[in-house]
Image (cartoon, grey):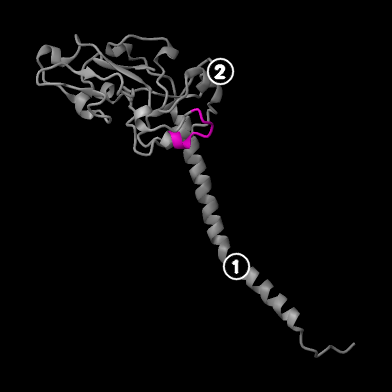
Amino acid sequence: MPESNTPPSGDSQRLARRAFFREGFRNLLKPVADLMEKRLDHLHETLEASRRAAMIEPPNHAGRGSSAEPEASRLIRPPGALEEELFLGRCAHSGECVAACPVEAIRLLQSEDARLHGTPYIDPQAQACVVCDDLACMQACPSGALQKLPRHLIDMGVAELRQDLCLRSNGDDCRICVDKCPIGPQAIQIPYHGAAVEVKTDGCVGCGVCEMYCPTTPRAIVVKPG
């Protein structure tokens, strides 16, 4: 049968052009899609590694002179944490707060108690919360176990000072806990030259920076969970 010399219709030409451009776009975007997939895979692996690395036991500071306490009594939860029972019921054990913390202050607890295992906590003597500007852990929490609060409403605990251990009680002019506090004089201060350190219980948020920097062994100032 002789071939037709009839030129393709306008519709056929338009369909052919669309198919040509679709194929071209696929070929153009494929390297970008492959690169994005590799980066997402790498990000996932990094987050998983961070979470695994954070699964550590709360350290026993008894060797440094502080008293060894039962596990649950020393748990300082991240800022914005609900009351403990509500927190345990709400926490998704996702590790998102761990990954979000800019100073790696948040760790995940290993415990034989299934309710506690994998929940976030802060050990101030290892790395205190710095009450970062973004309050990143609150933003990252997927379950609402960490509520979004303004800085002045954060209540992780309160710092308690042992005057007998404080260097100032022995005539030293140490003021590192006051100088390092991210909250400032509304949380901790030395009211006048030569005076003892005063913790303002209404202003202290329990971040633990004072405990982290305290130079004495055992620490003269420690945070008691709220």
Q: Is residue 185 left or right of residue 138?
A: left
Q: Residue furthest right?
A: 1
Residue 55 % position (x, y): 46, 26
Quadrant housing the N terminus: bottom right
When asked about the image quadrant of residue 217, the answer is top left
Q: Amino acid at mark 1?
A: Phe
Q: Is residue 129 above or below residue 9?
A: above
Q: Is residue 57 magenta?
A: no
* Label ID, residue 134: none
> In what element is the residue under mark 1?
helix
Question: Which mark is first along the chain, 2 or 1?
Answer: 1
The disc label shown at residue 114, or none: 2
Residue drawn at point x = 38 percent, y = 33 percent:
150
Q: Which residues are magenta?
A: 138-145
Q: Is residue 131 above or below residue 70?
A: below
Q: Main secondary structure of the magenta part?
A: loop
The answer to which quarter of the image holds residue 73 is top left
Residue 225 at what x, y percent from top left? 38, 17
Residue 142 falls within the magenta-colored stretch: yes
Residue denoted by label 1: 25
